[in-house]
Image (spheres, rainbow, N blue to C red):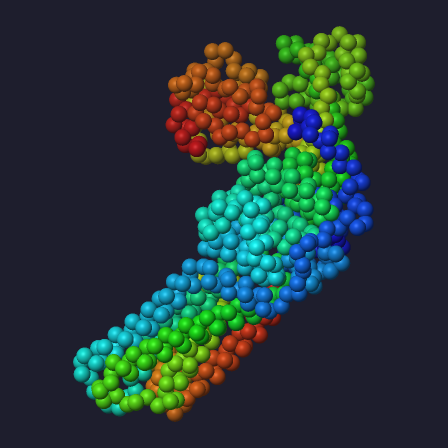
Amino acid sequence: MSTPQPQLAPQQPAAAPWQGAPGTSYTSPIPVVRTHLGHAIVSEWTKIKSVRSTMWTLGVFVFLLLGLGLLFAVIAASADMNLEGESPLGLGLFGVMLGSVCLITLGVLTTASEYGTGMIRTTLTACPSRSRVLAAKAIVFFALAFTITLVTTSLVAFLQVAILEGSNAADPSGEQWLKATVGVSLFLALFGLLSLLIGSLIRHSAGAITIMLGVFLAPLVIAIFMFAESLRDVQEFLLNYSIPSQLGVFYGAELGASAPSGWDPLWIMLGLVAAAFAGAFAVLEKRDV
Amino acid sequence: MIEAVGLTKRYGAKTAVYNLSFQVRPGAVTGFLGPNGSGKSTTMRMILGLDNPTSGQVTIGGYPYRKLPNAARQVGALLDAKAVHGGRSARSHLLSLAQLSGIPARRVDEVLGVVGLQDVAKKRSKGFSLGMGQRLGIAAALLGDPQVLLFDEPVNGLDPEGILWVRNLMKALAAEGRTVFVSSHLMSEMALTADHLIVIGRGQLLSDMSVKDFISANSADFARVRTPDTEPQLREKLTSALTGAGGQVLPEQDGALRVMGLPLPRISDLAHDVDVRLWELSPHQASLEEAYMRMTQGAVDYRSTIDQKAGLQQPLPPGAQPPMPVPGQGQPGWYAPPAPPQQGGQQFAPPQGQPPAGPYGAPAPGAAPAPAPGAPQPNPYAQAAPQAPVQPVATPAAPAAPAAAPAPAADLTKSEDAR
């Protein structure tokens, strides 16, 4: 400015103050603790429970599992359907299938929303150990998703068995119980975790959700339209290994000799998650935020 | 203490920061200046370990940021005020950061009080104004009570009270022996706050010195001389006399002369010798802003130009002339009075109508009809304008540019169009 600045005069920014006598450095009275993964987990727990998207996605998830599971059970009971020795637990499949979309969303948002808002820069400034942040997010999300799914699927399974008592349904065996509750919960939580890792790799919520929906639906849709005889093997593979089919395995829907059976889907998903984890860690450490 | 050595960052073919070396010492506020896109934020991100330098390194207290034990307790940063999840409340946001670095939860309420956000602590930060967001960002930086603080444009969006508070906060933090590194575009603010300046342009170091040295090294003090407007030949006469005596004379846009290299009494003597009366002879000290503009002139990447609206204007009515450009405007080397490269508001001046009545915007009596009811003075800012760095957007009543043609009544529609 062309007007003189009288304020400049009293300041006297002489070299003396900034050259700083040794020992002028500041020490905080708040004790400094050594941080570890536990701190990051507590922090991520605060984060995940303090945004509405968590409540919404999990609320819809529980609603779909409970609502559809019970709806089918009630319909089956009121129509006096003869289940012909089938386990009533299979009626929960449809709700779980739709509900998994909610876990995709929540998983992706857990990581990608930090990139969308710029929060990740604040987070990684507060904790420069990037792998610790990602690990904490994964642990918190997995624990939350597993717990919610386990509680909901167990509740649905109990109610279904109760509602369909006397409809000539088979009494579910111990393994059927285990698969329809713990098995499905582990599978879904791992699938959500895969979404979380894809969100961390893609760093864009909408993009990552689209990719995960593609992973979820595309194999099935593509397989349906594969009419050519030469593609028969591919079609069969896609049908057998699509996520909905793998979910069905937990409810006893065996597809064929070449299809995954028993606990296979869990191991497949575990492998995918491990690979995604390796990729996400490597990229996160290297990339600029 | 922050220490950068040969810091370089390339994004593909574009070099954002090149061979930057500097030190930021404790116990002082160090200002970090540079035009838009000069690499300030990139440098800040590299200091915080968010971006990896292509070559060179930067350390804080001897450690690269990502190797610091409990970094948040040693370094606090405000990078981008909106770097928060809008759906989270201010308190939850700070709480999650506190938990991440093992800071007791009551410290969260403490810093909320410090920045004055305790009343909105439970509100989601999505609804925060720019200034409130800035305060939340400052709260996050102060959370760990760190020894080193980095602030990127901390006064953006703050009200005058907030600006004063930040200024005093920076000084207080530095007085406690902390290292305070602040980037800003507001030169006047830096003049009041900073003790030391680091200036970069196009990613390279332009200057690293104290504010006082910076001003004296980068600006020449000058005298403003005004001869009677009524007799232009006197100005010519004085100019040649001053130049002959070894002075450097630049004409200013309002008709005054800017004289460098001659002391005031000597100018007065010379004028007396050639028998020229003076209406004004005043000393001017170059401000930090001027010094900065002079230094970064060659390093500005994004330069604004006049909005020509080419092809969008109605053809000029017969006999009308386009507005006369202001002498000196847009010329390299014209950095003071501290107007932006062109006069703000110029683009909103009605392009059609009378040519400027006075030499530089002073309305000739009776030359222009009143543009709108209630605004009998067509150009009330005509004289004052060159001193004001930012002009208000022109209203139909007041075309705010110094050289603006007074708006004729028919321009009401045009003004709407311009807005």
Outermost residue to the left: A79
A69 lies above or below A19: below
Rendering quarter of residue A288: bottom right
Q: Residue at x 80, y 40 (%)?
A: A16
Residue B406 vs residue B187, the one in the foreground: B187
User: On the rendered image, what quadrant is the C terminus of chain B found in?
Assistant: top left
Task: Say which residue appears at 75% left-offset and 26% top-offset.
Answer: B221
Q: Residue at x 74, y 56 (%)?
A: B61
Q: Nearer the viewer, residue A250 or B227?
A: A250
Q: Is residue B284 left or right of residue A167?
A: right
Q: Is residue B18 above or below residue A217?
A: above
In the rendered image, is residue B168 in sight? yes
Using the image as rendered, state which of residue A33 and residue B5 is in the foreground: A33
Image position, residue A79 (x, y; %): 18, 80
Residue drawn at x 72%, y 26% as measured from the top left: B285
Asked if residue B3 lies left or right of residue A57, the reply is: right
Quarter of image, res A192 = bottom left
Q: List x then y, in percent, for residue B98.
A: 58, 58
Using the image as rendered, state which of residue B256 and residue A93 is in the foreground: A93
Asked whether the viewer can see residue B126, the reply is no
On the rendered structure, is B31 left or right of B376?
right
**Image coordinates for residue A46, horizontal then vertical, percent:** 50, 62
Q: Position of residue A154 (x, y in %)?
A: 36, 79
Q: How many marks?
A: 0
Q: Is residue B335 above or below residue B406?
A: below
